[in-house]
Image (spheres, rainbow, N blue to C red):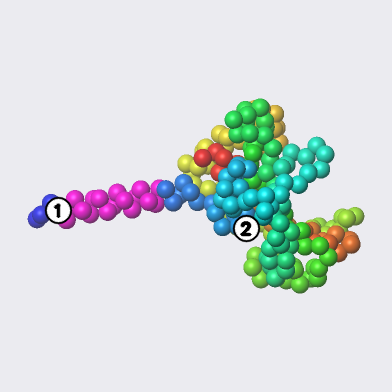
Amino acid sequence: MSKKPLILSCVVLLFILSFTGCKKQNKQYGYAPMFDKLTWGMSFQEVVNTMQLTKQNAKVVNAKENSVYTIIQLNDTYEKYGMKATVNLLITEGKEDTQEEYSYPTDALSAVVLQYGIVDADTLRANMEKELGEAKSDKTDDFGVVIVWKSKDRIASVYKAEQKAFYSYCEELKARGNESLSPKEKNTVNKITLSIANDGKCVVTYYGDWAIYINRSR
């Protein structure tokens, strides 16, 4: 029997195993941050480069006082769930090289907020349920209603090797003062919410939640 077919088979097998390993390492969990190629935990500059943002198509807006976020607002509205909205990308302040000074991931894409203004909330919710499935919970307070969709992925869905790095990263942040940082395997990776204010204004928010920590621990 010729050795060439055997060698070729080994090379193909090694390539497949290598590709599978890379795919596992790059797997994104939970709901993605809506736009292609964006991933949770990206730095400000990575977001700018990935979306090719300039002063002509986006701007940095002032966040509320004492906010930990830098907000990039896109100039053009974006149609999602059948309606147009203003898009805001929320990135935690601080630089990655100063991470050891903070108890949360710094300079990290953490949320995407769609501001719809006053629209037909029932239609918006129906359109979201067509894409996301039935919402997991509704909560009413003095300001309005918040409807929540939770990701199917949970911490338990993360590959074991990545889980180890993820828990280790969380322990580092916990040691820096973030004592409430206690992820559990049953926790969902992230969520999407629809907030309907009493005045009829609607806001959809994509949260990075644990997906930020998973990506930053890699």
Going 81% across and 70% down the picture, which residue do you hit?
120
Q: Main secondary structure of the magenta part?
A: helix
Image coordinates for residue 101, horizontal then vertical, percent: 66, 27
Query: Any magenta on residue 46?
Result: no
- Can residue 63 be seen from the camera position used here? yes
The answer to which of marks 2 and 1 sits earlier in the sequence is: 1
Query: Any magenta on residue 11?
Result: yes
Q: Residue furthest left?
A: 1
The amino acid type, in three-letter code, at marker 1 is Lys
Q: Quadrant of the N terminus?
A: bottom left
Front: mark 2 or 1: 2
- Can residue 187 be seen from the camera position used here? no
Image coordinates for residue 153, horizontal then vertical, percent: 58, 54
**Toward which corner of the image does residue 100 lie, by quadrant?**
top right
The amino acid type, in three-letter code, at marker 2 is Met
Question: What mark, if any, has residue 91 been given in the picture?
Answer: none
Real-space CA distance between mark 2 and mark 1, rounded to the nearest whole angstrom: 47 Å
Of residue 126 and residue 96, the one placed in the foreground of this image is 96
Q: Is residue 100 left or right of residue 16?
A: right
Residue highlighted by disc 2:
34
Residue highlighted by disc 1:
4
Q: Residues within 10 Å of mark 2 (few under 14, many from 20)?
A: few
Circle 2 sits in a helix, a strand or a loop, which is it? loop
* Start-end of magenta stretch: 4-21
